[in-house]
Amino acid sequence: MRILLIHPNYHSGGAEIAGHWPPAWAPYLAGALKANGFTDIKFVDAMTEEISSEGLAKIISDYQPDLVGATSITPSIYAAEEALKVAKQINPKIVTMLGGVHATFMYQQVLSEAPWVDVIVRGEGEEIVVELARAVASGNWPANRSEIKGLAYTEGSNGESQIVATAAAPTVKDLDAIKPDWGVLDWTLYRYIPMNTRVAIPNMARGCPFTCSFCSQWKFWRDYRVRDPKKVVDEIQELVEKYDVGFFILADEEPTINRKKFIQFCEELIARGLNKKVQWGINTRVTDILRDEQLLKFYNEAGLMHVSLGTEAAAQLKLDLFNKETKIADNKKAIRLLREAGIVTEAQFIVGLDSETPETLEETYRMAMDWKPDLANWSMYTPWPFTPLFKELSDKVEVFDFAKYNFVTPIVKPAAMERGELLDRVMNNYRRFYMYKAFFSYPWSGSGRRRRYLLGCLKAFLKAGFERKFYDLGRVGYWGPQSKKKVDFQFDTTRKISHAQMADWEANADRSRKAAASQMAIVSACGGGTEQMEESEADAKAALAKSVTSRMAENTHDAGSVTRH
Protein backbone atom coordinates (compact mmCIF):
# COMPACT_ATOMS: atom_id res chain seq x y z
CA MET A 1 0.00 0.00 0.00
CA ARG A 2 1.25 3.47 -0.89
CA ILE A 3 0.94 6.34 1.59
CA LEU A 4 1.50 9.99 0.72
CA LEU A 5 1.93 12.59 3.47
CA ILE A 6 1.56 16.28 2.56
CA HIS A 7 2.59 19.39 4.45
CA PRO A 8 0.24 22.06 3.05
CA ASN A 9 1.47 25.11 1.18
CA TYR A 10 0.78 27.95 3.61
CA HIS A 11 2.81 31.10 4.34
CA SER A 12 2.28 34.03 6.69
CA GLY A 13 5.59 35.80 7.20
CA GLY A 14 5.92 34.73 10.82
CA ALA A 15 8.42 32.21 12.16
CA GLU A 16 9.46 31.16 8.64
CA ILE A 17 11.49 34.36 8.22
CA ALA A 18 14.28 32.63 10.18
CA GLY A 19 14.47 29.80 7.68
CA HIS A 20 12.73 26.69 6.45
CA TRP A 21 11.58 24.39 9.24
CA PRO A 22 11.33 20.61 8.80
CA PRO A 23 7.79 19.36 9.57
CA ALA A 24 8.50 16.97 12.44
CA TRP A 25 5.03 15.39 12.29
CA ALA A 26 5.91 13.55 9.08
CA PRO A 27 8.99 11.66 10.40
CA TYR A 28 7.13 10.65 13.56
CA LEU A 29 4.13 9.34 11.61
CA ALA A 30 6.34 7.69 8.98
CA GLY A 31 8.40 6.02 11.70
CA ALA A 32 5.30 4.53 13.33
CA LEU A 33 3.93 3.34 9.98
CA LYS A 34 7.21 1.77 8.86
CA ALA A 35 7.61 -0.01 12.20
CA ASN A 36 4.28 -1.67 11.44
CA GLY A 37 5.10 -2.80 7.92
CA PHE A 38 3.96 0.17 5.83
CA THR A 39 7.19 1.00 4.05
CA ASP A 40 6.02 2.61 0.80
CA ILE A 41 5.74 6.18 2.11
CA LYS A 42 6.36 9.45 0.33
CA PHE A 43 6.43 12.89 1.92
CA VAL A 44 5.82 16.17 0.09
CA ASP A 45 6.62 19.48 1.78
CA ALA A 46 4.43 21.72 -0.36
CA MET A 47 5.08 24.64 1.97
CA THR A 48 8.87 24.72 1.76
CA GLU A 49 8.95 23.85 -1.94
CA GLU A 50 5.96 26.13 -2.64
CA ILE A 51 4.19 23.46 -4.66
CA SER A 52 0.98 24.63 -6.30
CA SER A 53 -2.21 22.59 -6.57
CA GLU A 54 -1.23 21.77 -10.15
CA GLY A 55 2.20 20.57 -9.04
CA LEU A 56 0.63 18.53 -6.28
CA ALA A 57 -1.79 16.96 -8.75
CA LYS A 58 1.13 15.73 -10.86
CA ILE A 59 2.91 14.23 -7.84
CA ILE A 60 -0.24 12.41 -6.75
CA SER A 61 -0.95 11.21 -10.29
CA ASP A 62 2.60 9.86 -10.65
CA TYR A 63 2.75 8.20 -7.22
CA GLN A 64 -0.78 6.75 -7.21
CA PRO A 65 -1.20 6.53 -3.42
CA ASP A 66 -3.91 4.56 -1.64
CA LEU A 67 -3.92 6.83 1.40
CA VAL A 68 -3.16 10.57 1.45
CA GLY A 69 -2.74 12.43 4.73
CA ALA A 70 -2.22 16.08 5.60
CA THR A 71 -1.86 18.02 8.82
CA SER A 72 -3.16 21.42 9.81
CA ILE A 73 -2.75 24.08 12.40
CA THR A 74 -5.53 26.65 12.35
CA PRO A 75 -4.08 29.03 9.72
CA SER A 76 -3.18 26.21 7.33
CA ILE A 77 -6.55 24.43 7.49
CA TYR A 78 -7.81 25.68 4.12
CA ALA A 79 -4.52 24.78 2.41
CA ALA A 80 -4.70 21.30 3.93
CA GLU A 81 -8.31 20.87 2.79
CA GLU A 82 -7.32 21.98 -0.72
CA ALA A 83 -4.46 19.44 -0.87
CA LEU A 84 -6.84 16.61 -0.03
CA LYS A 85 -9.36 17.92 -2.54
CA VAL A 86 -6.70 17.62 -5.24
CA ALA A 87 -6.10 14.00 -4.21
CA LYS A 88 -9.80 13.17 -4.52
CA GLN A 89 -9.95 14.82 -7.93
CA ILE A 90 -7.05 12.70 -9.16
CA ASN A 91 -8.58 9.47 -7.86
CA PRO A 92 -11.87 9.33 -5.88
CA LYS A 93 -10.81 5.97 -4.45
CA ILE A 94 -7.92 7.53 -2.50
CA VAL A 95 -8.66 7.62 1.23
CA THR A 96 -8.03 11.16 2.44
CA MET A 97 -7.20 11.82 6.08
CA LEU A 98 -6.57 15.04 7.97
CA GLY A 99 -4.94 15.52 11.36
CA GLY A 100 -3.56 18.25 13.57
CA VAL A 101 -4.84 20.45 16.36
CA HIS A 102 -7.42 22.38 14.34
CA ALA A 103 -9.06 19.34 12.76
CA THR A 104 -9.04 17.56 16.14
CA PHE A 105 -11.26 20.15 17.81
CA MET A 106 -13.11 21.60 14.81
CA TYR A 107 -13.96 18.38 12.99
CA GLN A 108 -17.66 19.24 12.67
CA GLN A 109 -16.85 22.39 10.74
CA VAL A 110 -14.03 20.83 8.71
CA LEU A 111 -16.08 17.85 7.55
CA SER A 112 -18.99 20.15 6.72
CA GLU A 113 -16.95 22.52 4.57
CA ALA A 114 -14.65 19.87 3.05
CA PRO A 115 -16.76 16.76 2.33
CA TRP A 116 -13.89 15.28 0.31
CA VAL A 117 -12.03 14.63 3.59
CA ASP A 118 -12.79 10.99 4.36
CA VAL A 119 -11.56 10.93 7.94
CA ILE A 120 -10.10 13.14 10.63
CA VAL A 121 -7.52 11.79 13.06
CA ARG A 122 -8.14 13.35 16.47
CA GLY A 123 -5.15 13.87 18.73
CA GLU A 124 -1.63 12.52 18.36
CA GLY A 125 -1.64 10.33 15.33
CA GLU A 126 1.01 7.61 15.50
CA GLU A 127 -1.12 4.77 16.86
CA ILE A 128 -4.40 5.89 15.26
CA VAL A 129 -2.93 6.23 11.77
CA VAL A 130 -1.44 2.73 11.97
CA GLU A 131 -4.88 1.30 12.75
CA LEU A 132 -6.41 3.33 9.94
CA ALA A 133 -3.75 2.14 7.46
CA ARG A 134 -4.37 -1.47 8.46
CA ALA A 135 -8.07 -1.06 7.77
CA VAL A 136 -7.39 0.43 4.33
CA ALA A 137 -4.77 -2.18 3.42
CA SER A 138 -7.01 -5.10 4.45
CA GLY A 139 -10.02 -3.79 2.54
CA ASN A 140 -11.95 -3.16 5.75
CA TRP A 141 -12.24 0.56 5.13
CA PRO A 142 -14.74 2.13 5.58
CA ALA A 143 -16.71 -0.86 6.89
CA ASN A 144 -14.76 -1.14 10.16
CA ARG A 145 -13.98 2.53 10.79
CA SER A 146 -16.34 2.73 13.76
CA GLU A 147 -14.09 0.27 15.60
CA ILE A 148 -11.06 2.59 15.46
CA LYS A 149 -10.78 5.09 18.30
CA GLY A 150 -9.82 8.67 17.64
CA LEU A 151 -11.59 9.24 14.31
CA ALA A 152 -14.27 11.56 12.96
CA TYR A 153 -16.02 11.08 9.62
CA THR A 154 -19.23 11.62 7.72
CA GLU A 155 -21.64 8.70 7.59
CA GLY A 156 -24.41 8.41 5.02
CA SER A 157 -24.86 10.62 1.98
CA ASN A 158 -26.41 13.96 1.04
CA GLY A 159 -29.50 14.79 3.11
CA GLU A 160 -29.18 11.66 5.26
CA SER A 161 -25.55 12.19 6.27
CA GLN A 162 -24.31 12.79 9.81
CA ILE A 163 -20.90 13.43 11.35
CA VAL A 164 -19.68 10.70 13.65
CA ALA A 165 -16.82 10.76 16.14
CA THR A 166 -15.53 7.55 17.64
CA ALA A 167 -14.34 7.55 21.26
CA ALA A 168 -11.16 9.51 21.91
CA ALA A 169 -8.11 7.28 21.61
CA PRO A 170 -5.76 6.99 24.59
CA THR A 171 -2.58 9.02 24.38
CA VAL A 172 0.68 7.33 23.40
CA LYS A 173 2.05 6.04 26.68
CA ASP A 174 5.51 4.94 25.52
CA LEU A 175 6.94 7.83 23.55
CA ASP A 176 10.36 6.18 23.53
CA ALA A 177 8.94 3.35 21.44
CA ILE A 178 8.34 5.77 18.56
CA LYS A 179 11.31 5.86 16.20
CA PRO A 180 10.94 8.79 13.82
CA ASP A 181 12.08 8.25 10.26
CA TRP A 182 14.02 11.46 9.65
CA GLY A 183 15.10 10.07 6.28
CA VAL A 184 11.64 10.79 4.88
CA LEU A 185 12.66 14.48 4.67
CA ASP A 186 14.80 16.11 2.00
CA TRP A 187 17.33 17.74 4.30
CA THR A 188 18.71 20.03 1.62
CA LEU A 189 15.52 22.08 2.02
CA TYR A 190 15.87 23.00 5.68
CA ARG A 191 18.20 25.81 6.63
CA TYR A 192 18.35 28.08 9.65
CA ILE A 193 19.36 31.50 8.35
CA PRO A 194 20.99 32.92 11.53
CA MET A 195 23.56 30.11 11.55
CA ASN A 196 23.43 29.09 7.88
CA THR A 197 23.05 25.46 8.86
CA ARG A 198 20.52 22.67 8.71
CA VAL A 199 17.85 22.77 11.41
CA ALA A 200 15.65 20.16 13.10
CA ILE A 201 12.74 20.24 15.56
CA PRO A 202 12.79 17.13 17.78
CA ASN A 203 10.78 16.92 20.99
CA MET A 204 11.61 15.79 24.50
CA ALA A 205 8.10 15.88 25.93
CA ARG A 206 4.51 16.15 24.84
CA GLY A 207 1.86 18.20 26.51
CA CYS A 208 2.02 20.55 29.44
CA PRO A 209 0.72 20.22 33.02
CA PHE A 210 -0.38 23.85 33.07
CA THR A 211 -3.30 25.70 31.58
CA CYS A 212 -2.43 29.02 29.93
CA SER A 213 -5.72 30.41 28.71
CA PHE A 214 -4.43 31.34 25.24
CA CYS A 215 -2.71 28.01 24.53
CA SER A 216 -4.14 24.88 22.92
CA GLN A 217 -1.20 22.50 23.30
CA TRP A 218 -2.07 21.24 26.77
CA LYS A 219 -5.57 20.46 25.51
CA PHE A 220 -4.37 18.70 22.37
CA TRP A 221 -1.76 16.41 23.96
CA ARG A 222 -3.83 15.88 27.17
CA ASP A 223 -1.19 14.01 29.16
CA TYR A 224 2.19 15.49 30.04
CA ARG A 225 4.82 12.85 29.18
CA VAL A 226 8.60 13.20 29.16
CA ARG A 227 10.87 10.98 27.11
CA ASP A 228 14.06 9.34 28.32
CA PRO A 229 16.70 12.07 27.82
CA LYS A 230 19.17 9.50 26.47
CA LYS A 231 16.69 8.47 23.79
CA VAL A 232 16.23 12.10 22.81
CA VAL A 233 19.98 12.56 22.54
CA ASP A 234 20.18 9.36 20.46
CA GLU A 235 17.81 11.07 18.04
CA ILE A 236 19.82 14.28 18.03
CA GLN A 237 23.03 12.37 17.47
CA GLU A 238 21.46 10.77 14.40
CA LEU A 239 20.31 14.17 13.14
CA VAL A 240 23.80 15.62 13.58
CA GLU A 241 25.87 12.72 12.27
CA LYS A 242 23.59 11.37 9.54
CA TYR A 243 21.77 14.48 8.34
CA ASP A 244 24.33 17.19 9.13
CA VAL A 245 22.02 19.19 11.40
CA GLY A 246 23.82 22.09 13.08
CA PHE A 247 20.96 23.65 15.03
CA PHE A 248 17.79 22.32 16.62
CA ILE A 249 14.87 23.72 18.54
CA LEU A 250 13.09 21.53 21.06
CA ALA A 251 9.43 21.49 20.06
CA ASP A 252 8.27 21.29 23.68
CA GLU A 253 6.08 24.03 25.07
CA GLU A 254 8.47 24.30 28.00
CA PRO A 255 11.25 21.69 28.16
CA THR A 256 12.55 23.00 31.50
CA ILE A 257 9.35 22.11 33.39
CA ASN A 258 10.92 18.82 34.47
CA ARG A 259 14.27 20.12 35.64
CA LYS A 260 15.64 16.66 36.44
CA LYS A 261 15.06 15.41 32.90
CA PHE A 262 16.34 18.63 31.36
CA ILE A 263 19.57 18.41 33.36
CA GLN A 264 20.03 14.79 32.28
CA PHE A 265 19.48 15.88 28.68
CA CYS A 266 22.20 18.53 28.96
CA GLU A 267 24.59 16.12 30.67
CA GLU A 268 24.11 13.58 27.91
CA LEU A 269 24.83 16.13 25.18
CA ILE A 270 28.05 17.10 26.94
CA ALA A 271 29.08 13.49 27.61
CA ARG A 272 28.82 12.65 23.90
CA GLY A 273 30.55 15.82 22.77
CA LEU A 274 27.47 16.93 20.86
CA ASN A 275 27.59 20.34 22.56
CA LYS A 276 30.62 21.04 20.34
CA LYS A 277 28.78 20.01 17.17
CA VAL A 278 25.28 21.44 17.47
CA GLN A 279 23.68 24.50 19.04
CA TRP A 280 20.04 24.65 20.08
CA GLY A 281 17.18 26.74 21.34
CA ILE A 282 14.08 26.43 23.49
CA ASN A 283 10.92 28.23 24.50
CA THR A 284 10.52 28.51 28.23
CA ARG A 285 9.14 30.63 30.99
CA VAL A 286 10.55 33.34 33.20
CA THR A 287 9.97 31.43 36.44
CA ASP A 288 12.09 28.51 35.22
CA ILE A 289 14.99 30.83 34.42
CA LEU A 290 14.82 32.41 37.87
CA ARG A 291 14.66 28.95 39.43
CA ASP A 292 17.73 27.78 37.50
CA GLU A 293 19.89 30.87 37.95
CA GLN A 294 22.91 28.82 39.03
CA LEU A 295 22.51 26.38 36.14
CA LEU A 296 22.31 28.75 33.19
CA LYS A 297 26.02 28.60 32.35
CA PHE A 298 25.79 24.82 32.50
CA TYR A 299 22.90 24.92 30.03
CA ASN A 300 24.97 27.17 27.78
CA GLU A 301 27.87 24.73 28.03
CA ALA A 302 25.50 22.02 26.78
CA GLY A 303 24.94 24.06 23.61
CA LEU A 304 21.87 26.11 24.56
CA MET A 305 22.20 29.23 22.42
CA HIS A 306 18.73 30.77 22.17
CA VAL A 307 15.94 31.09 24.74
CA SER A 308 12.59 32.54 23.78
CA LEU A 309 10.83 33.81 26.88
CA GLY A 310 7.09 34.08 27.22
CA THR A 311 7.10 37.50 28.82
CA GLU A 312 3.78 37.86 26.94
CA ALA A 313 2.71 41.39 27.82
CA ALA A 314 3.94 44.60 29.34
CA ALA A 315 0.82 45.38 31.36
CA GLN A 316 0.43 43.21 34.46
CA LEU A 317 -3.29 43.17 33.76
CA LYS A 318 -2.58 41.19 30.61
CA LEU A 319 -0.30 38.78 32.44
CA ASP A 320 -3.15 38.02 34.81
CA LEU A 321 -5.58 37.54 31.93
CA PHE A 322 -3.21 35.02 30.35
CA ASN A 323 -2.93 33.09 33.66
CA LYS A 324 0.76 33.88 33.89
CA GLU A 325 2.53 33.82 37.25
CA THR A 326 5.26 36.23 36.24
CA LYS A 327 5.74 39.81 37.33
CA ILE A 328 7.28 42.63 35.34
CA ALA A 329 10.44 42.76 37.48
CA ASP A 330 10.91 39.00 37.01
CA ASN A 331 11.00 39.41 33.24
CA LYS A 332 13.83 41.93 33.41
CA LYS A 333 15.86 39.82 35.82
CA ALA A 334 15.45 36.61 33.80
CA ILE A 335 16.68 38.34 30.65
CA ARG A 336 19.69 39.74 32.48
CA LEU A 337 20.60 36.33 33.88
CA LEU A 338 20.43 34.70 30.45
CA ARG A 339 22.51 37.45 28.88
CA GLU A 340 25.16 37.08 31.60
CA ALA A 341 25.27 33.33 30.92
CA GLY A 342 26.03 33.99 27.25
CA ILE A 343 22.61 32.88 26.00
CA VAL A 344 20.76 34.84 23.33
CA THR A 345 17.42 35.97 24.73
CA GLU A 346 14.20 36.68 22.86
CA ALA A 347 11.30 38.44 24.58
CA GLN A 348 7.82 37.60 23.30
CA PHE A 349 5.04 40.16 23.57
CA ILE A 350 1.40 39.45 22.78
CA VAL A 351 -0.37 42.50 21.43
CA GLY A 352 -3.69 43.24 19.77
CA LEU A 353 -6.25 42.55 22.47
CA ASP A 354 -9.42 44.62 22.64
CA SER A 355 -7.84 46.87 25.27
CA GLU A 356 -4.74 47.68 23.18
CA THR A 357 -3.94 51.37 22.72
CA PRO A 358 -1.05 53.32 21.20
CA GLU A 359 0.12 53.91 24.77
CA THR A 360 0.24 50.20 25.71
CA LEU A 361 2.15 49.41 22.51
CA GLU A 362 4.63 52.16 23.32
CA GLU A 363 4.95 50.66 26.79
CA THR A 364 6.02 47.31 25.32
CA TYR A 365 8.72 49.09 23.34
CA ARG A 366 10.01 50.95 26.38
CA MET A 367 10.07 47.74 28.38
CA ALA A 368 11.90 45.90 25.61
CA MET A 369 14.56 48.62 25.64
CA ASP A 370 14.73 48.59 29.45
CA TRP A 371 14.93 44.80 29.75
CA LYS A 372 17.59 44.59 27.01
CA PRO A 373 16.70 41.26 25.37
CA ASP A 374 18.78 40.44 22.31
CA LEU A 375 15.64 39.92 20.23
CA ALA A 376 12.04 41.03 20.62
CA ASN A 377 8.94 39.73 18.94
CA TRP A 378 5.50 41.36 18.94
CA SER A 379 2.88 38.73 18.10
CA MET A 380 -0.71 39.58 17.34
CA TYR A 381 -3.11 37.88 19.71
CA THR A 382 -4.56 34.93 17.84
CA PRO A 383 -7.76 33.57 19.41
CA TRP A 384 -7.58 29.83 18.79
CA PRO A 385 -11.26 28.82 18.68
CA PHE A 386 -10.65 25.91 21.03
CA THR A 387 -9.00 27.77 23.93
CA PRO A 388 -10.53 29.16 27.15
CA LEU A 389 -9.55 32.71 26.28
CA PHE A 390 -11.49 32.52 23.02
CA LYS A 391 -14.66 31.86 24.97
CA GLU A 392 -13.99 34.84 27.21
CA LEU A 393 -13.31 37.17 24.29
CA SER A 394 -15.62 35.65 21.68
CA ASP A 395 -17.83 38.74 21.53
CA LYS A 396 -14.75 40.71 20.43
CA VAL A 397 -13.90 38.31 17.58
CA GLU A 398 -15.44 39.32 14.27
CA VAL A 399 -13.11 37.54 11.82
CA PHE A 400 -13.45 33.81 11.25
CA ASP A 401 -11.12 33.52 8.27
CA PHE A 402 -8.77 30.98 9.82
CA ALA A 403 -6.09 31.54 7.18
CA LYS A 404 -5.40 34.84 8.98
CA TYR A 405 -5.08 33.26 12.45
CA ASN A 406 -1.31 33.39 12.18
CA PHE A 407 0.11 35.70 14.90
CA VAL A 408 0.84 38.43 12.34
CA THR A 409 -2.70 39.51 11.41
CA PRO A 410 -4.80 41.52 13.90
CA ILE A 411 -7.87 39.32 14.31
CA VAL A 412 -9.31 41.29 17.23
CA LYS A 413 -9.87 44.98 16.53
CA PRO A 414 -8.86 47.11 19.53
CA ALA A 415 -11.60 49.43 20.71
CA ALA A 416 -9.31 52.46 20.48
CA MET A 417 -7.47 51.67 17.23
CA GLU A 418 -8.01 50.57 13.66
CA ARG A 419 -6.25 47.39 12.58
CA GLY A 420 -4.02 49.30 10.16
CA GLU A 421 -2.83 51.59 12.95
CA LEU A 422 -2.18 48.59 15.18
CA LEU A 423 0.03 47.02 12.50
CA ASP A 424 1.81 50.33 11.94
CA ARG A 425 2.55 50.75 15.65
CA VAL A 426 3.90 47.21 15.87
CA MET A 427 6.13 47.83 12.84
CA ASN A 428 7.32 51.04 14.47
CA ASN A 429 8.39 49.01 17.49
CA TYR A 430 10.28 46.58 15.27
CA ARG A 431 12.00 49.35 13.29
CA ARG A 432 13.21 51.21 16.37
CA PHE A 433 14.26 48.13 18.30
CA TYR A 434 16.28 46.48 15.54
CA MET A 435 17.79 49.72 14.24
CA TYR A 436 19.20 50.30 17.69
CA LYS A 437 20.46 46.73 17.89
CA ALA A 438 22.03 46.90 14.41
CA PHE A 439 24.03 50.05 15.17
CA PHE A 440 24.69 49.95 18.90
CA SER A 441 24.45 46.33 20.09
CA TYR A 442 25.07 43.40 17.76
CA PRO A 443 28.41 44.54 16.28
CA TRP A 444 29.84 44.82 19.80
CA SER A 445 28.38 41.63 21.30
CA GLY A 446 31.74 39.94 21.67
CA SER A 447 33.73 38.09 19.04
CA GLY A 448 32.45 34.54 19.38
CA ARG A 449 29.44 32.49 18.43
CA ARG A 450 26.97 34.77 20.25
CA ARG A 451 27.91 37.77 18.09
CA ARG A 452 27.80 35.70 14.90
CA TYR A 453 24.40 34.35 15.88
CA LEU A 454 22.95 37.82 16.51
CA LEU A 455 24.30 39.17 13.23
CA GLY A 456 22.73 36.14 11.54
CA CYS A 457 19.38 36.96 13.15
CA LEU A 458 19.68 40.51 11.88
CA LYS A 459 20.39 39.19 8.39
CA ALA A 460 17.24 37.04 8.50
CA PHE A 461 15.17 39.99 9.71
CA LEU A 462 16.49 42.35 7.03
CA LYS A 463 16.09 39.73 4.29
CA ALA A 464 12.44 39.16 5.16
CA GLY A 465 11.81 42.89 5.38
CA PHE A 466 13.43 43.61 2.02
CA GLU A 467 11.39 40.83 0.37
CA ARG A 468 8.21 42.19 2.01
CA LYS A 469 7.54 38.75 3.50
CA PHE A 470 7.88 39.78 7.13
CA TYR A 471 4.43 39.98 8.73
CA ASP A 472 2.97 39.42 5.26
CA LEU A 473 3.57 43.13 4.59
CA GLY A 474 3.73 42.81 0.82
CA ARG A 475 0.42 40.99 0.59
CA VAL A 476 -1.50 43.41 2.81
CA GLY A 477 0.02 46.49 1.19
CA TYR A 478 1.88 48.04 4.12
CA TRP A 479 4.76 50.33 3.08
CA GLY A 480 5.15 52.48 6.15
CA PRO A 481 3.10 54.93 8.27
CA GLN A 482 1.76 56.66 5.17
CA SER A 483 -0.02 53.44 4.12
CA LYS A 484 -1.61 52.46 7.43
CA LYS A 485 -5.07 53.61 6.34
CA LYS A 486 -4.85 51.65 3.09
CA VAL A 487 -3.80 48.29 4.53
CA ASP A 488 -6.04 45.47 3.32
CA PHE A 489 -5.89 42.28 5.36
CA GLN A 490 -8.09 40.55 2.77
CA PHE A 491 -10.36 38.84 5.29
CA ASP A 492 -12.82 36.36 3.82
CA THR A 493 -15.95 37.66 5.52
CA THR A 494 -18.07 34.76 4.27
CA ARG A 495 -16.36 32.43 6.71
CA LYS A 496 -18.39 31.49 9.78
CA ILE A 497 -17.52 29.53 12.88
CA SER A 498 -18.99 26.54 14.67
CA HIS A 499 -18.26 25.48 18.21
CA ALA A 500 -15.25 23.36 19.06
CA GLN A 501 -16.03 19.73 19.91
CA MET A 502 -14.52 18.74 23.25
CA ALA A 503 -17.26 16.78 24.98
CA ASP A 504 -15.13 13.62 25.27
CA TRP A 505 -11.81 15.43 25.51
CA GLU A 506 -10.36 16.25 28.91
CA ALA A 507 -6.72 17.00 29.49
CA ASN A 508 -4.92 15.87 32.61
CA ALA A 509 -4.29 19.54 33.35
CA ASP A 510 -8.06 20.04 33.45
CA ARG A 511 -8.44 17.26 36.00
CA SER A 512 -5.51 18.52 38.06
CA ARG A 513 -6.95 22.01 38.14
CA LYS A 514 -10.33 20.75 39.30
CA ALA A 515 -8.76 18.51 41.93
CA ALA A 516 -6.71 21.40 43.27
CA ALA A 517 -9.61 23.82 43.46
CA SER A 518 -9.99 23.41 47.20
CA GLN A 519 -6.28 23.48 47.99
CA MET A 520 -4.08 26.40 49.01
CA ALA A 521 -2.57 27.08 45.57
CA ILE A 522 -3.45 26.25 42.00
CA VAL A 523 -0.76 26.31 39.34
CA SER A 524 -2.45 27.55 36.18
CA ALA A 525 0.33 28.80 33.98
CA CYS A 526 3.09 27.36 31.85
CA GLY A 527 5.83 27.29 34.44
CA GLY A 528 7.20 25.17 37.25
CA GLY A 529 5.64 24.90 40.68
CA THR A 530 7.20 24.40 44.10
CA GLU A 531 6.91 20.63 44.12
CA GLN A 532 8.95 20.35 40.96
CA MET A 533 11.66 22.57 42.41
CA GLU A 534 11.94 20.56 45.59
CA GLU A 535 11.88 17.26 43.76
CA SER A 536 14.91 18.07 41.63
CA GLU A 537 17.01 20.28 43.93
CA ALA A 538 19.56 17.57 44.60
CA ASP A 539 19.90 16.82 40.90
CA ALA A 540 20.43 20.51 40.18
CA LYS A 541 23.21 20.77 42.75
CA ALA A 542 24.84 17.61 41.43
CA ALA A 543 24.70 18.90 37.85
CA LEU A 544 26.20 22.22 38.88
CA ALA A 545 29.04 20.52 40.76
CA LYS A 546 29.66 18.20 37.84
CA SER A 547 29.76 21.11 35.42
CA VAL A 548 32.26 23.03 37.56
CA THR A 549 34.44 19.95 37.95
CA SER A 550 34.32 19.34 34.20
CA ARG A 551 35.43 22.88 33.41
CA MET A 552 38.22 22.71 35.99
CA ALA A 553 39.43 19.45 34.41
CA GLU A 554 39.40 21.03 30.96
CA ASN A 555 41.33 24.04 32.21
CA THR A 556 43.90 21.78 33.88
CA HIS A 557 44.25 19.76 30.68
CA ASP A 558 44.69 22.92 28.61
CA ALA A 559 47.31 24.27 31.02
CA GLY A 560 49.17 20.96 30.86
CA SER A 561 49.11 21.05 27.09
CA VAL A 562 50.61 24.55 27.08
CA THR A 563 53.37 23.44 29.47
CA ARG A 564 54.23 20.37 27.40
CA HIS A 565 54.44 22.33 24.14
Image (cartoon, rainbow, N blue to C red):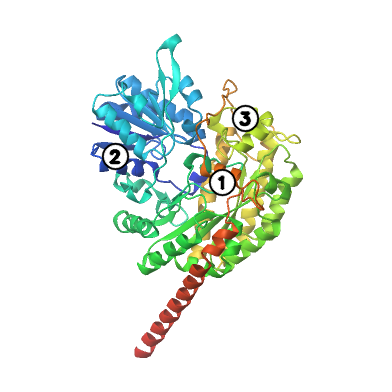
Q: In terms of secondary structure, where does tag 2 sit?
A: helix
Q: Choose the circle earlier in sequence order: 1 or 2.
A: 2
* Residue type at tag 1: Ser
* Residue at the image point whose x is 62% and y is 28% from the top: 399
**Quarter of the rendering containing residue 168:** top left
Separation of marks 3 and 2 at Cα, in angstroms: 44 Å
Disc 1 versus disc 3: nearer the observer: 1
Q: Which mark is residue 488?
A: 3
Circle 2 crowding by C-alpha within 10 Å: few under 14, some 14–19, many from 20: many
Q: Quadrant of the C terminus?
A: bottom left
User: Is 259 placed above or below 462 here?
Assistant: below
* Residue at the image point whose x is 55% and y is 68% from the top: 341
- Front residue of 312/346: it is 312
User: Is 137 placed above or below 265 here?
Assistant: above
Q: Quadrant of the N terminus?
A: top left
Q: Choose the circle earlier in sequence order: 3 or 2.
A: 2
Q: Which mark is residue 33?
A: 2
Relative placement, left or right, of 325 versus 199 is: right
- Label pair 3/2, CB-CB below 8 angstroms: no
- Front residue of 72/558: it is 72
- Label pair 1/3, CB-CB below 8 angstroms: no
Q: Which mark is residue 512?
A: 1
Q: Can residue 441 be spotted in the picture?
A: no
Q: Position of residue 259 (x, y in %)?
A: 50, 61
Q: Residue furthest bottom?
A: 563
Separation of marks 1 and 2 at Cα, in angstroms: 33 Å
**Quarter of the rendering containing residue 169:** top left
Q: In terms of secondary structure, where does tag 1 sit?
A: helix
Q: Position of residue 554 (x, y in %)?
A: 41, 79
* Numbered disc total: 3
Q: Position of residue 7 (x, y in %)?
A: 39, 36
Q: Choose the circle earlier in sequence order: 1 or 3.
A: 3
